[in-house]
Image (cartoon, rainbow, N blue to C red):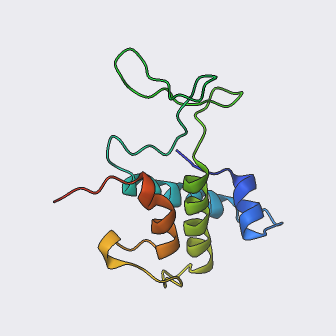
Amino acid sequence: MMYVTLAQANLHLRRTETVDDADVLLKIEAASEAVAHFLSHERDTPYIQATNSAGQALFDSAGYPILAEDSAGNPIVKRTVQQATLLLLGEFYRSRDGEQQGGIDPTFGMLPRPVVALLYPSHTPVIA
């Protein structure tokens, strides 16, 4: 599962070379997994919910949300999730030795604050 494409990552990182595409793809996957882990509750979805022509959310017969799909039939990722993934990818790309540049909030693990700020509205807090 990747929440952003290599092309989106290249634009975000302002890359034009392709020699390290495999490394960037690994970082995209890692950032996507970290975001997915933050949104790990069953009600937290990284995808946009489908709506009818009146703008009402659609649900299947079991009451589960129906996801909006692109022309290829893939679920559409929320823009906030894409941006959070790109921010985290940028952190991984710049800090190849693991020294985080952005401020962190220990309440939410080691994700940079801008990433948490983007994801928090879609996050269901869980009491351990």
Image position, residue 59 (x, y; %): 44, 23
- For image coordinates 58% across by 58% down, the residue present is 28
| Residue 83 visible, this orientation | yes
Q: Residue at x 57, y 49 (%)?
A: 3
Is residue 55 toward the left or the right of residue 66 in the image? right
* Front-most of residues 65 and 89: 65
Q: Quadrant of the C terminus?
A: bottom left
Residue 19 visible in the displayed image: no
Q: Position of residue 18 (x, y in %)?
A: 78, 62
- Tell me where residue 111 sits by quadrant: bottom left
Q: Residue at x 38, y 57 (%)?
A: 38
- At 38% across and 74% down in the image, what residue appears? 110
Asked if residue 68 lies left or right of residue 38, the reply is: right
Image spot of residue 90 (x, y percent): 62, 71
As drawn, which residue projects farthest toward the top?
61
Is 113 in front, or is 91? 113
Total residue callouts: 0
**Up/down of 43 relative to 40, above or below:** above
Q: Nearer the viewer, residue 42 or 16?
A: 42
User: Residue reaching furthest left?
Assistant: 128
Question: Where residue 87 sits in the image (x, y, percent)?
Answer: 59, 68
**Residue that extends furthest to the right in the rendered view of this protein:** 16
